[in-house]
């Protein structure tokens, strides 16, 4: 682990339990928002590629077949 991460872990020890729980909640919300933004970008990119004819609709069976081959 890098030094910054270790420093953060060490400093968390100085927080009260309530503050630590608040920090956990805050981090979970930030992570969830970041993931939502990533998914939104992926969807936008896929829609653009589809409109440009770079993608075609596939059934779940087609996707599984492609993965397994």
Image (spheres, rainbow, N blue to C red):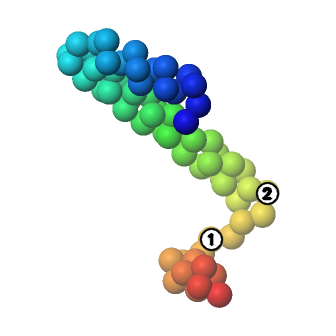
Task: Say which residue appears at 49% left-offset and 20% top-offset.
Answer: 7
Residue depicted at x 25% and y 23%: 21
| Residue 57 position in % (x across, y down) | 62, 71
Q: Where is the N terminus found, in terms of image quarters?
A: top right
Residue at 31%, 26% (x, y): give it. 25
Are circles 2 and 1 on residues that touch, CB within 8 Å?
no
Q: Position of residue 4 (x, y in %)?
A: 56, 22
Q: Which residue is found at the position 32% from the left and 27% from the top?
A: 24
Horizontal placement of 17 versus 44: left or right? left
Secondary element at image label 1 = loop
Helix, strand or loop for disc 2:
loop
Residue situated in front as seen by the camera: 32 or 27 = 27
Q: Quadrant of residue 22?
A: top left
Location of mark 1 (residue): 57
> Does 45 appear above or below 65?
above
13, above or below 63, in the image: above
For label 2, the residue is 52
**Position of residue 33 in the picture relative to residue 49 (left or right):** left
Number of callouts in the render?
2
Evaluate whether residue 62 shows in this view.
no
User: Which label's residue is closer to the chain start, 2 or 1?
Assistant: 2
Dot 2, crowdedness within 10 Å: few (<14), some or many (≥20)? few
Q: Where residue 47 sits in the image (x, y, percent)? A: 66, 52
The answer to whether any part of residue 25 appears in the image is yes
**Residue at far left of view:** 18
Check the image and report above or below for 14 versus 48: above
């Amino acid at each position: 682990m890098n030094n910054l991460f270790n420093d953060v872990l060490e400093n968390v020890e100085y927080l009260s339990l309530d503050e630590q729980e608040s920090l956990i909640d805050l981090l979970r919300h930030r992570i969830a928002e970041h993931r939502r933004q990533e998914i939104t970008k992926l969807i936008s990119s896929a829609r653009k590629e589809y409109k440009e004819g770079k993608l075609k609709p596939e059934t779940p069976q087609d996707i599984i077949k492609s993965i397994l081959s």
